[in-house]
Amino acid sequence: MDGRKRTYRLYRPASVDLATPVPLVVMLHGAAGTGEQAEQAYGWTGQADRDGFVVVFPDGLNRAWAVGPQCCGAPAREGVDDVAFITELVATLGKDLPVDPARRYVTGISNGGLLAYRLVCDTTTFAAIGAVASTLTGQCPDPKPVSVLHVHGQQDQTMPYGGGPGRRDNDGTGRNPVKIDGPPTPELAARWRTVDSCAAPKVTTDGPVTRSTATCAQGRAVELITIADAGHQWPGGRPNPARAEKLLNLDPPSTALNATDTIWRFFAAHPKPTGG
């Protein structure tokens, strides 16, 4: 699209019956990642085998996603329309596979989570979002109701739990603009509870994991999972190579939660309401 070649990896378990509608999960990698890296690191193909859904791993151009003119990286600088790319990709897959329109979901980490939020701000394509170590940037004046699960480490210095710029922020300047101006994570969850007409959340804590869960109108839900001792990572993901972790200042994945299984169970419980 836009004269640019776009690529993705698609995984369809052999057990999926193409005679019946199936769920689709779009998994968006973080900055410096790829679809292949996300497929290998986060365990979504195994989850798809166990639970019978199709998962697609798109590639951002230059290993990043544009969520606005100030973020992120070369795609933002060049004005790439990644919302249109993902929307078109989902529509194309729906022509080739019996994708259930009520069970289309998007998940992402970091820059991929930024795009996931952008997608539910700007479209009604998805029934639910699962954002990990991410936030909402830019304007989102009139989002439509959608189920939201947000997973965040309280020690995250790249997408700070308390909001505002992180350690990779350059105020959206230079050849690789990165401006991250998200609200405190609890405020972001509260905003979606308002959008979704939710009841007051119920809060439970088990070790380092705190869950704030709200039931909402038309069967939707908003859940925030906070991991007290975790940084910028995908909980339960594949450990980083030790050398890369040191050189790139990467946070190790938390073992307190399996984010992939948690997100899938949330997705499976929250299809798009009839007529919604």
Image (tube, rainbow, N blue to C red):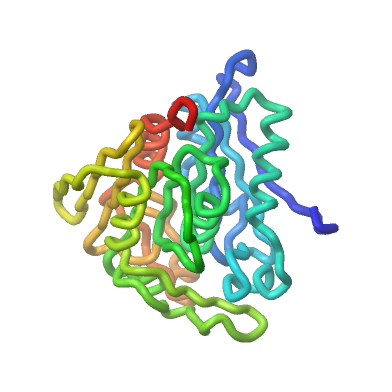
Seen from this angle, which residue lies furthest right? 3
Q: Residue at x 29, y 52 (%)?
A: 224
Percent x, y of residue 275: 49, 28
Percent x, y of residue 71: 57, 72
Report the label total: 0
| Residue 145 as seen in the image, left or right of residue 81 | left
Q: Residue at x 62, y 73 (%)?
A: 69
Front residue of this view, candidates 108 and 48: 108
Q: Residue at x 20, y 47 (%)?
A: 201
Seen from this angle, which residue lies furthest top? 19
Percent x, y of residue 255: 30, 52
| Residue 244 as seen in the image, left or right of residue 182 | right
| Residue 119 as seen in the image, left or right of residue 260 | right
In which quadrant of the rendered view does residue 132 lie? bottom left
Seen from this angle, which residue lies furthest front? 142
Q: Residue at x 58, y 20 (%)?
A: 21
Percent x, y of residue 67: 58, 64
Compared to residue 201, the image places residue 167 above or below, namely below
| Residue 230 as seen in the image, left or right of residue 59 | left
Compared to residue 13, the image places residue 120 above or below, namely below
